[in-house]
Image (cartoon, rainbow, N blue to C red):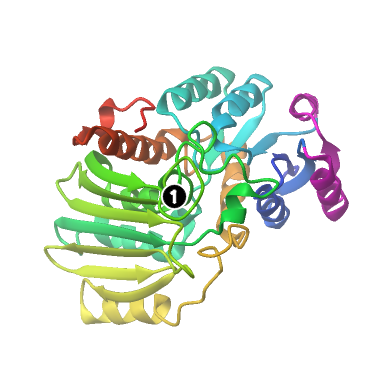
């Protein structure tokens, strides 16, 4: 990519290490600085990546050489940190979820618009070639009228994930915004909306079964999509030893099922297309480890998002996954929590950061 490299700074160096790798792998981007309040972790990353280190976020924002701030901190401070970045004139890459309350996302969106900066969001499943191919097939009507779309996330997290030196914010309402659905499962919920469109109303249940945490480690929801399709999703961190995300969709003309990044079956279109899809995306499931280990995340999708941010800045356009799209998954999760807490079906559009 032509032109001066876009310089990134990453704040939050747990999962943020994946952002550092992705930035270094992204065309047109360069990692220029990292920031973390934990000085030991900061020193390790400064040495590993050979960049400037800051233990104070305000100092990172004052760095005139930084074009983009990649925010990978506790979910409950995402919007506040994004607003500060926007006011400092920095573009933003925001890790999921954008924040834990739609009302705070509203404020972030206004700050981004007022500052004239870009804000791209991390939902790397949207960059996956299989998911893109499925979306195109559905949009072209090859599955017919969408009738059902269902997601499962059978993951496992040990208690140390929540109680270790960097984990006490996880599984809390104040900083994580929930448990298995808001943290781990929000990718699955976003993918369901990516494939089938927005969700209109929900009902659900959640509870804590196998961890010492505030929020849920298992949740189940029923979804009614705006197009009339019905869906379900379950998320958990209790499923020993953990398995891949699974998505099953069907319509009036066909169906598909995928596990992780593997297409298990594809019954849409003609025989030639079915064969081509299975040859391209079928095969043996390769366990990337994310179902068992939060740090076992591939950087490929993140790399594509970083490259898209570079192009968005140079072309003065919206990023591929803007705030306006990334917020809906948060709205759905908040609606599920409210539905579970009240025992009612909840209209997603009426949720403003509520939880059960």
Quadrant hosting residue 195 = bottom left
Instruction: Give the residue at x 47% y 37%.
Output: 322
The main secondary structure of the magenta stretch is helix
> At 85% across and 47% down in the image, what residue appears?
46
Q: Is residue 60 magenta?
A: yes
Q: Secondary structure at mark 1?
A: helix
Which residue is disc 1 drawn over? Answer: 180
Q: Which residues are magenta?
A: 38-64
Residue 148 is drawn in which quadrant?
bottom left
Q: What residue is at 36 percent from the left and 28 percent from the top?
A: 354
Q: Position of residue 254 (x, y in %)?
A: 17, 69
Q: Residue at x 59, y 23 (%)?
A: 83
Q: Quadrant of residue 235?
A: bottom left
Q: Nearer the viewer, residue 179 or 308?
A: 179
Q: For this rendering, which residue is in front, 165 or 122?
A: 165
Q: Residues within 10 Å of mark 1 (few under 14, many from 20)?
A: many
Pick the front one: 329 or 263: 329
- In this orientation, which residue lies closer to the viewer: 14 or 277? 14
Relative to 3, 94 lies left or right = left
The C terminus lies in which quarter of the figure?
A: top left
Whether residue 308 appears in magenta in the rendering, the answer is: no
The percent position of residue 303, horizontal first and vertical second, equals 61, 55
Q: Residue furthest left?
A: 252
Q: Say left or right for 259 vs 60.
A: left
Give percent across and percent down for residue 236.
Answer: 41, 56
Judge whether residue 140 can be spotted in this image: no
Residue 162 located left or right of residue 333: right
Does 334 sit above or below residue 153?
above
* Above-or-below relation of 242 to 7: below
Residue 302 vertical placement versus 172 (above, below): below
Q: Is residue 223 visible?
A: yes
Q: Position of residue 105 (x, y in %)?
A: 46, 27
């Amino acid at each position: 990519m032509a032109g001066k490299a876009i310089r990134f700074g990453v704040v939050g160096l747990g999962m943020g290490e994946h952002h550092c790798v992705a930035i270094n792998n992204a065309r047109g981007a360069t990692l220029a600085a990292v920031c973390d309040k934990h000085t030991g972790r900061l020193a390790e990353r400064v040495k590993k990546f050979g960049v400037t280190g800051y233990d104070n976020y305000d100092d990172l924002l004052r760095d005139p050489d930084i074009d983009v701030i990649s925010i990978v901190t506790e979910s409950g401070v995402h919007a506040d940190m994004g607003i500060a970045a926007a006011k400092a004139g920095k573009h933003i890459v925001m890790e999921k979820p954008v924040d834990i309350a739609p009302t705070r996302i509203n404020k972030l969106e206004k700050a981004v618009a007022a500052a004239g900066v870009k804000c791209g969001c991390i939902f790397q499943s949207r960059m996956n070639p299989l998911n893109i191919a499925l979306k195109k097939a559905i949009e072209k009507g090859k599955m017919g009228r969408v009738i059902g779309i269902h997601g499962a996330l059978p993951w496992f997290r040990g208690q140390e994930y929540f109680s270790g030196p960097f984990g006490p914010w996880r599984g809390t309402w104040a900083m994580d915004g929930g448990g298995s659905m808001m943290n781990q499962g929000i990718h699955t919920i976003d993918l369901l909306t990516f494939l089938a469109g927005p969700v209109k109303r929900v009902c659900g249940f959640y509870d804590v079964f196998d961890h010492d945490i505030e929020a849920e480690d298992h949740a189940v929801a029923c979804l009614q999509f705006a197009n009339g399709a019905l869906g379900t999703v379950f998320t958990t961190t209790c499923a020993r030893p953990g398995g891949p995300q699974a998505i099953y969709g069907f319509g009036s003309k066909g169906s598909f099922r995928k596990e992780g990044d593997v297409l298990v079956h594809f019954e849409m279109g003609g025989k030639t297309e079915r064969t081509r899809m299975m040859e391209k995306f079928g095969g043996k499931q390769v366990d990337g480890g994310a179902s068992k280990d939060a740090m076992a995340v591939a950087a490929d999708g993140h790399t594509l998002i970083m490259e898209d941010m570079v192009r968005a800045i140079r072309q003065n356009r919206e990023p591929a996954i803007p705030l306006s799209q990334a917020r809906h998954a948060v709205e759905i999760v908040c609606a599920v929590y409210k539905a579970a807490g009240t025992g009612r079906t909840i209209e997603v559009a009426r949720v403003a950061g509520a939880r059960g």
